[in-house]
Image (spheres, rainbow, N blue to C red):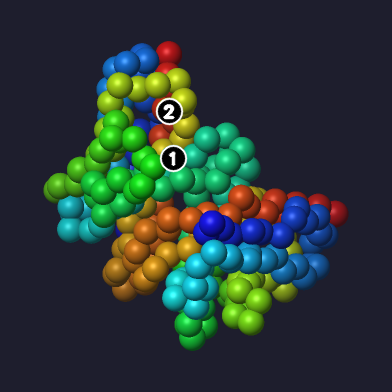
Amino acid sequence: YVLTQPPSVSVAPGKTATITCGGNNIGSKTVYWFQQKPGQAPLLVISYDSDRPSGIPERFSGSNSGDTATLTISRVEVGDEADYYCQVWANSRDPLYVFGPGTTVTVL
Amino acid sequence: EVQLVQSGAEVGKPGESLKISCKGSGYTFTNYWIAWVRQMPGKGLEWMGSIYLGDSDSRYSPSFQGQVTISADTSINTAYVRWNSLKASDTAMYYCARHKAVGDYMDVWGRGTTVTVSS
């Protein structure tokens, strides 16, 4: 199972960043999103397509339908600069976790 | 505080064996799975496999099956990944992360262990 993400997204502070994660009928799977800042471990920012773990700002939201899942960051801050990865559990012939290739968000 | 503490950076030579560890604290270790995730320099995240600490059931990514062995010692709340014969291409950062069930989210991550393989 293959996931696709745009390599990079640029956004001005205070604007909205939209990061897509494409996969065949991904809407039928559960999507997780992780944020990774340089030199740090990944941080879960969205679980079960659209749930925010405790401590994650409301500015982070997720959706999932059809062939595309989306992470939206509203009112972007400089501190949101990071790589963002989507992840699914591909329960196919070879069950496994699959990560997307990652999207670098740059705050201009 | 729930945390996963990983062992320190390792340097090895091609052909050598190596085992790195991940120790859990602040939660009931045997109620969770521990996943291992590779990140090669400048690259993305790759799931290697997971082990359930309740009964040592393990699942591997096809890409890593036969390349590494994931194990655990529940008496000391520690999970491991072992290489029998290192390759230069094993040079990477390795993270452990816990998840409640197969297919569930990875909510707590270790800080990572850097493995460098060089002759």
All told, the count of numbered labels is 2
The correct choice, above or below, for A11 with respect to B20 in the image is above
> Looking at the image, is mark 2 or mark 1 earlier in the sequence?
1
Q: Residue A77 in the image: x percent, y percent? A: 40, 21
Q: Secondary structure at mark 2?
A: helix
At label 1, the amino acid type is Gln
Rendered residue at 72%/73% (across/down): B84
The amino acid sitting under disc 2 is: Asp
* Res B78 seen here: yes
The crowd level at tag 2 (other Cα within 10 Å; few <14, some 14-19, many 20+) is some
Name which residue lies at 41% across and 52% down: A99
Which residue occupies the foreground of this view, A17 or A97?
A17
Query: CB of mark 2 within 8 Å of CB of mark 1?
Result: yes
Q: Is residue A34 left or right of residue B95?
A: left
Identify the residue at horizontal 37%, vertical 71% (top origin): B101
Front-lying residue, B113 or B67? B113
Q: Residue at x 42, y 65 (%)?
A: B99
Tell me residue B33's x, y (percent): 47, 71
Distance, label 2 to label 1, CA atoms, is: 9 Å
Mark 2 belongs to chain? A
Q: Residues within 10 Å of mark 1 (few under 14, many from 20)?
A: many
User: Taking the image as drawn, is residue B85 in sight?
Assistant: no
Residue B67's spot in the image, x, y percent?
Answer: 61, 70
Pick out the residue farthest to the bottom. Answer: B55
Is B52 on the left or on the right of A22, as rendered?
Answer: right
Question: Which residue corresponds to mark 1?
Answer: A35
Q: Quadrant of the N terminus of chain B?
A: bottom right
Residue B46, numbered label: none
The x, y position of residue B6, in whole percent, is 66, 59
User: Chain under label 1?
Assistant: A
- Mark 1: secondary structure: strand
Residue position marked by numbered label 2 in the rendering: A80
